[in-house]
Amino acid sequence: MLSIQRRRAFTLVELLVVIAIIGVLVGLLLPAVQAAREAARRMSCSNNFKQIGLAVHNYHSAYSQMPKQGTGTTGTTLNEGQSTTWAGASWGPPGHNRMELSALVGMTPFIEQQALWEQISNPLASPQNPGSLFSPMGPNPGRNLASHSNDRYDPWLANIPSFRCPSDPGVGLPAQGRTNYAVCLGDSTTRSNMGVYWHNGATDSQMYEMARESNRGAFQPRRESRFRDILDGLSNTICMGEIATDLGDKDARTEAAKNPNVSDSWSHSKANNLAACQTVKDPERPQFWATTGSNVASLTSTVEERRGYRWAHFTPIFTGMLTILPPNREVCNSQPSQPQWLATGESTAPPSSRHQGGVHVLMCDGAVKFITDSIEAGNQNSAEVRRGGPYVAPGSASPFGLWGALGTRASKETIEAEL
């Protein structure tokens, strides 16, 4: 007799169960995959910072000082309608840069960017006008995209991989050349955007003294900084911090708002003012500025003047960070009288990142630490360190706790906590 063998098939119920199990497994695995990818990006970001730390130390070995924040060239030639009150700023060929180059520019030959450094340190022809040469060290890095469209200076538009964190998705225009790493300027906004004041090539002695007393970070704008100046110890002092670049989404960490409590930079530094921009943040989305309601944020920048948008420019919004507000807090600007400085004025400029819960910082000894958003930051309603008036006296310990102490080079605070 012939036997009939029946082939067993899946029932519809069994098939649905299998699909459901696969869906659950995928749902469980995807977050793990994303977390693993972010862990890899975070490690890559830390490695970039270590390479930058080596660059700082190699630069110091070569020149007996750290790369200067606010360096370059100055002169008397005026181009493109610049006023004589701005120390001969020149935006087009031949060009000089008004001592506004960031410390990152000097690091380029120490991070395997020798070819870029050769372009910067030698006369360079404009692609649009080959017979017109930019002077060595280039034009002012604050020139806008319209100026580059007439006479493009390619080095300032370069995107350097070693200066980018893989976790930051920001790319392209209107940024000229993004950076996610910024130098530490200390715990006081005073003169953090200018340092020694340049006016027609001369130094104002009063402003010099104010800068000397208030610029307490490892880097001092427009002044040489050396390891020997860091009396608190290289391992106890922040050299650089991580910053997120702007995505055009009104993120309070990457686009500056005017301090609603003040009308000038002098009162910006007083008690209860440094954290005043909290009042103009969106109450439902506290990471973003308010765009509707009774407390709409007054934003200071144009689309080209956002956090990390110009790697070659020395002002805090682009390549600086301070240890006043804790990491990933808002960028709150003073309201100086000169409209040219609205976006690049004195600013709280805390570090920020796209990592979860904190930021990387580079210590002056070359170590990379991860600082959480909840770091002890003292009295956020305190005035800052500044001479005269209702301010904290120069030479005092930082009023901003452990966070402020890490940002100062010689305030003699004792740091007992392990980072």
Image (tube, rainbow, N blue to C red):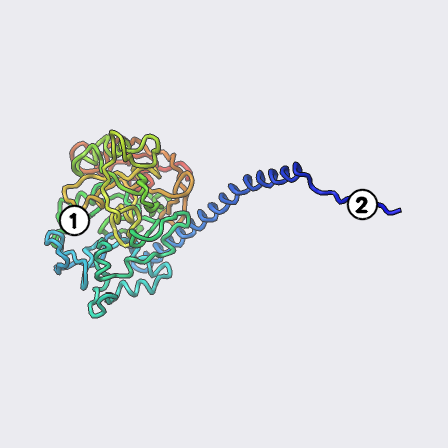
Q: Looking at the image, is mark 2 or mark 1 earlier in the sequence? A: 2
Question: Mark 1 = which residue?
Answer: 197
Q: Amino acid at mark 2?
A: Gln
In the rendering, at what x and y percent does residue 67 appear? 29, 55
Q: Secondary structure at mark 2?
A: loop
- Who's the residue at 15% across and 58% down the image? 80
User: Does residue 174 appear anywhere in the picture?
Assistant: yes
Q: 371 or 216: which is nearer to us?
A: 371
- Mark 2 or 1: the one toward you: 2
Using the rendered view, name the quadrant where residue 297 is placed: top left
Could you say which is closer to the camera, residue 267 or residue 156? 156
- Residue 148 picture quarter: bottom left
Write down the residue under mark 2: 5
Q: Reply above or below: 289 against 54.
A: above
Q: Residues within 10 Å of mark 2 (few under 14, many from 20)?
A: few
Q: Nearer the viewer, residue 195 or 23?
A: 23
Residue occupying image coordinates x 37% and y 45%? 361
Horizontal arrangement in the rendering, residue 27 relative to residue 275 (left or right): right
Left-right relation of 80 to 224? left
Q: Position of residue 358 (x, y in %)?
A: 40, 40
